[in-house]
Amino acid sequence: LVVFSPSGKAFSFGHPNVDTMIDRYLSQVIPQNNDTMQFIKARRSANVSAINAHLTQINNMLDDVKKHGDELSHFLKEINALLWWACPIGGMNGGA
C-alpha cells in the first residue's frame, strides 16, 4: 500500500515488507488466452507471408527492369556500330 501525505510525501506499507510486495506484483505473469495467442501467431504469419509475396513481386520486377536495361545497352552498342560515321571525331580511335 502506498499513500501520500497532504504535503506530497509517499509512505508505503506492506507485509512482510514493501519490497516483497513489489517483487510479487512485478513478477506476476499474466496468463494469455490460448485462442488469443493462436490469433496473434496466425496474424503475424499472414503478415509475413504477404510481405514475402510483395518482396518476391518487387524482385521479379527489378529483374525485368535489369534485363530491359541490358537489352537497351546492347541495342545502343549495335546502333553506334552501324552509325560509326555519326560519332564525334575525337571518339574514334584508329583501329578498334
Image (cartoon, helix red, strand yellow):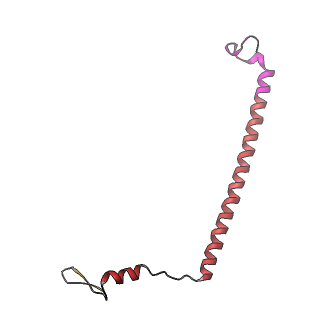
* Quadrant placement of the C terminus: top right
- Residue at x 76% of width, y 34% of height: 72
Viewed as shown, does residue 45 lie left or right of 30?
Answer: right
Give above or below for 67 relative to 16: above
Q: Is residue 65 above or below residue 1?
A: above
Q: In the rendered image, which quarter is residue 44 located in? A: bottom right
Q: Residue furthest top?
A: 94
Residue 21, picture quadrant: bottom left
Q: Is residue 64 above or below residue 12?
A: above
Q: Residue farthest to the front? A: 16
Q: Nearer the viewer, residue 59 or 69?
A: 59
Residue at horizontal 19 percent and vertical 83 percent from the top: 6
Residue drawn at x 21%, y 79% as measured from the top left: 9
Q: Which residues are magenta?
A: 77-96
Residue 33 drawn in magenta: no
Left of 53 or right of it: where is 23?
left
Q: Position of residue 85 (x, y in %)?
A: 77, 15
Helix, strand or loop: magenta stretch? helix
Q: Quadrant of the N terminus?
A: bottom left
Position of 88 with respect to 30 (left or right) is: right
- The quarter holding residue 41 reads bottom right
Q: Position of residue 51 (x, y in %)?
A: 66, 60
Q: Residue furthest left?
A: 7
Q: How far from the left and from the top, in percent, is residue 86?
A: 75, 18
At 67% across and 13% down in the image, what residue appears?
90
Q: Closer to the camera, 38 or 56? A: 38
Query: Residue 18: x, y in percent?
Result: 31, 83
Q: Nearer the viewer, residue 3 or 57?
A: 3
In screen coordinates, is 33 left or right of 59? left
